[in-house]
């Protein structure tokens, strides 16, 4: 069965990016290789087996306030993205949600041949996907305080750190990006000009 993308964009330098719905059963083996890779330690699934990965993403697929997507680069699976309602998932009681808030996670697939700027192109794709919904006003993330690489990526696309919070799994920097800040980052060329180390991107 052909799965059509839900969203697509073309990066000026790196080509076609898209997102499609995640299939917990069909994508389980692929996801297992990604989320248990040593560079995905902030995803917190290092010890999971394939069945546990399938179960977790089936739970997300069935959740009314949480979604997961496979990201494609030039038609090939290259990253994982999640969107969630932060008033119902992840951040309940940890910040004051506003109408139009959406939470986001992303994870780039491990690779032995990293491409400069690829992770920045991925987060830009995910942000454009979030803001493609006109009801979305802000994107909210809660990366681990130790995840310095993703803090730089977040800043590049317009996120501001609001406060340090403690979730059940980690100490995190609650960070928020408004539609206006993301558009300004794109207009100023910050998204393409900011040098970011091309390694595994993980928002958690």
Image (cartoon, grey):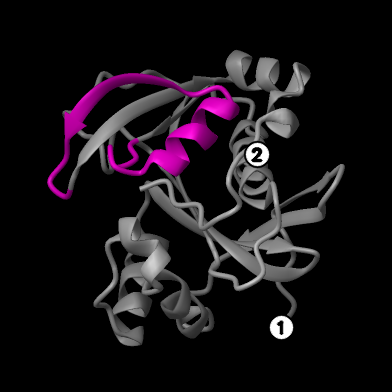
**Mark 2 Cα shell of 10 Å, populated few (<14), some (14-19), many (≥20):** many
**Is 172 colored magenta in this rendering?**
no
Q: Is residue 55 shown left or right of residue 132?
A: left
Task: List x then y, in percent, for residue 79.
Answer: 58, 61
Asked where in the image residue 70 lies, by quadrant, the reply is bottom right
Q: Is residue 103 visible?
A: no
Q: Is residue 124 shown left or right of residue 26?
A: right
Q: Is residue 52 visible?
A: yes
Along the viewing direction, whichever of 25 and 30 lies nearer the viewer: 30
**Is 154 colored magenta in this rendering?**
yes
Proximity of marks 1 and 2: CB atoms separated by less than 8 Å:
no
Q: Which residues are magenta?
A: 142-169
Pick the quarter of the image with the N terminus. Answer: bottom right
> Which mark, residue 1?
1
User: Reading the chain from its start, which is encountered first: label 1 or label 2?
Assistant: 1
Task: List x then y, in percent, for residue 76.
Answer: 72, 71
Dot 2: what SS?
helix
Task: List x then y, in percent, for residue 33.
Answer: 46, 79
> Which mark, residue 186?
none
Residue at the image point whose x is 31% and y is 69% from the top = 56
Q: Is residue 78 above or below residue 138?
A: below
Along the viewing direction, whichever of 192 and 45 lies nearer the viewer: 192
The nearer-to-camera label among 1 and 2 is 2
Task: List x then y, in percent, for residue 141.
Answer: 39, 35
Residue at the image point whose x is 65% and y is 39% from the top = 124
Whole-angstrom CA distance, mark 1 to mark 2, is 29 Å
Dot 1: what SS?
loop
Q: Which residue is mark 2?
A: 124
């Amino acid at each position: 069965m052909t799965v059509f993308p839900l969203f697509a964009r073309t990066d000026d330098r790196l080509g076609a990016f898209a997102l499609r719905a995640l299939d917990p059963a069909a994508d389980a083996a692929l996801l297992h290789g990604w989320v248990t890779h040593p560079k995905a330690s902030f995803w917190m699934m290092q010890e999971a087996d394939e069945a546990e990965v399938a179960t977790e993403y089936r739970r997300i697929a069935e959740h009314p306030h949480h979604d997961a997507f496979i990201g494609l680069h030039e038609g090939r699976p290259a990253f994982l993205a999640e969107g969630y309602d932060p008033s119902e998932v992840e951040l309940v009681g940890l910040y004051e949600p506003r109408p139009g808030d959406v939470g986001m996670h992303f994870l780039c697939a491990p690779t032995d041949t990293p491409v400069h700027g690829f992770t920045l192109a991925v987060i830009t794709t995910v942000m454009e996907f979030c803001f493609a919904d006109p009801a979305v006003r802000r994107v909210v993330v809660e990366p681990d305080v130790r995840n310095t690489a993703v803090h730089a990526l977040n800043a590049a696309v317009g996120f501001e750190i609001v406060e340090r919070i403690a979730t059940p799994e980690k100490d995190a920097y609650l960070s928020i990006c408004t539609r206006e800040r993301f558009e300004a980052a794109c207009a100023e060329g910050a998204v393409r000009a900011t040098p970011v180390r091309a390694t595994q991107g993980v928002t958690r």
